[in-house]
Amino acid sequence: MQIDSLDTPAAILDADVVIYVIAERLQSADRDALAMVSPANAVAVLNKADAVSSHWSDVVVRANDTMKITGVQTVPLVAPIGGTTSMSTVGDQELRDFRILAASDDPTLTLSPDLFAAAEVPVNTRDRLALLSRWELAGVTTALDTMRREPNIDAARLTQILHAFSGVDAAKTVVAARVHRSAALRGGALLDTLEKLAARSSSRDPIEQFLRGPTAAELGLAAGLASPALVDVVAGRDARQPVNAAEALRLAEWWTRYAASDVGAPSRRAANRIRHGYSARSVERA
């Protein structure tokens, strides 16, 4: 893994997957950096999302606005809370403290860490500071709001809500999709290289045998589905994989028709790889 920062001389953001972290608000330096990457293999993470607003809907709006400006998919993240919920759950004492604090009618209780620590409530200062240390103000606020809506909530459920609030799963999902796409395109590049080698190599026969086999068909299928030329087409189709030979054959026939239509060469090449992949599956599962 290579990590470049904006302070690195001649930083090159050309990795298979680029994860760019934005702190709270998009700055001009962020825009310049994101202009150097391909949106197809980049993810912008709006970190410290809790500093944007105490309302998650406002955070999502900020992330969407950032995506519109940069063209790069942007996901909000509260990393400290996500880190805590990934490794542990809300403790029994914490649950009791949250429940007591949720009953407070002090409107300033969670306006700032200092006000929370100085409040006159039936939870001692040491325990409140411990809550801030583990969950930060955003997590405490979310926990108290949740407690007021669901007074009988248990620790496991509250942990799930805090974990969802952190945004860590959404960030993982987006990054995993980028990694999967990158691997698929690398598989397609491998097939391209082998096809060129087969045309002029003394080892033509074994190379062509591999290219006709099931492994190459699967590599081609994945590469075709990940092709930048077919992003809109693939997104508009059912993402479920065929469960039997008949479904695979129907998909192969659809992509055959698509490849024969008035599309550009990159789209046709990708569609033919998809068609070949599904055709191979239909034979394999017959």
Image (cartoon, helix red, strand yellow):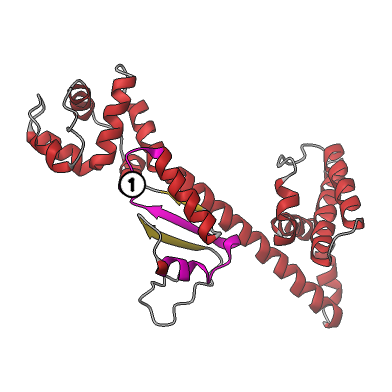
Horizontally, is 135 left or right of 252 in the view? left
Q: Quadrant of residue 122?
A: top left
Q: Is residue 213 visible?
A: no
Locate the C terminus and report the quarter of the image it occupies. top right
Q: Residue at x 32, y 26 (%)?
A: 146
Q: Quadrant of residue 127?
A: top left
Residue 226 belongs to the span the image colors magenta: no
Horizontally, is 172 left or right of 223 in the view? left
279 or 174: nearer the eye?
A: 174
Q: Residue at x 47, y 71 (%)?
A: 32
Horizontally, is 123 left or right of 5 in the view? left
Dot 1 amino acid type: Gly
69 or 30: nearer the eye?
A: 69
Q: Is residue 115 visible?
A: yes
Residues in magenta, as a range: 29-56
Q: Quadrant of residue 39?
A: bottom right
Identity of the residue furthest to the top in this view: 152
Where residue 91 appears, as percent x and y from the top left, is 24, 31
Where residue 115 appears, as percent x and y from the top left, is 13, 38
**Judging from the image, what secondary structure is the residue with disc 1 in?**
helix
Q: Residue at x 50, y 72 (%)?
A: 13
Residue carrying label 1: 83
Where residue 116 appears, as percent x and y from the top left, is 15, 36
Residue 49 belongs to the span the image colors magenta: yes
Where residue 138 appears, as percent x and y from the top left, is 28, 40
